[in-house]
Amino acid sequence: MRYFRMRSFAAGRCPHITRGHSCPRGSADRPLPAAGSALRIKRVRRGPILVVEVAGDVDAETAPTLFAALAAAIDVTPRVCCDLRGVDFFGADGANVLATAHIQAAHARGAFSVRGVHGFAARVLDLTGLSGILRMED
C-alpha cells in the first residue's frame, strides 16, 4: 500500500501530488461542485423530538447549511435527531457538524442523536471515533 504525503492547499497544490507538481491554477482552491451535491433538509416533529431529515451530499460545500439547520433545531428544542438515511456522500465536514451539534445540545442540557447511518457516513463516523460518542438510533 502506498502512502502519500499531503501538501498544503494554500500553496496551490493538489493534495494527491507529492513531487511539487501543481494543479492548474485555482483548481485546488475552487474545485468543481459534484453533480449531486445538492442538500435537502426537512424538519419533522415526532413527539418531543425534532427530527432533521437530510438527503444528498454532506461535504465542505453543504456542511454549513446542515450546521445551520441543526443549530436552529437545537435552539427550538434541545432534543434533536439527525436522520442520515437519504445521504449519499458524507465527508469529514459532516462529522465536524455532527460533533458540534452534539456539544451544542449538551450545553442546552438536551440530547442529540443520529439515525440512518450507512455507507460513507458509517465509515467516517467510525474512523473519527464519533460512532462511540454520538448516540446512534436504528
Image (cartoon, rainbow, N blue to C red):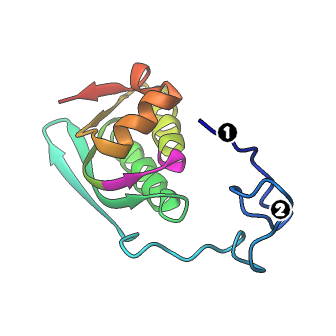
- Residue appearing at x 86%, y 60% in the figure: 20
State the extent of the magenta-drawn residues as a range: 88-94
Q: Which mark is residue 135?
A: none
- Residue appearing at x 31%, y 56% in the figure: 88
For badge 1, the amino acid type reads Tyr
Q: Is any part of residue 29 visible from this angle? A: yes
* Front in this rendered view, residue 49 or 4: 4
The x, y position of residue 91, in whole percent, is 48, 49
Q: Which mark is residue 3?
A: 1
Work out which residue is located at the far bottom of the displayed protein and give it: 25
11 to the left or right of 49: right
* Front in this rendered view, residue 77 or 32: 32
For badge 2, the amino acid type reads Ala
Q: Give SS at disc 1.
A: loop
The x, y position of residue 68, in whole percent, is 47, 56
- Residue appearing at x 22%, y 40% in the figure: 116
Q: Tell me where residue 49 sits by quadrant.
A: top left
Q: Is any part of residue 108 visible from this angle? A: no
* Front in this rendered view, residue 118 or 2: 2
Mark 2 lies on residue: 10
How far is the residue under mark 2 from the one under mark 1? Answer: 21 Å
Residue 90, magenta (yes or no): yes
Work out which residue is located at the far left of the displayed protein and give it: 47
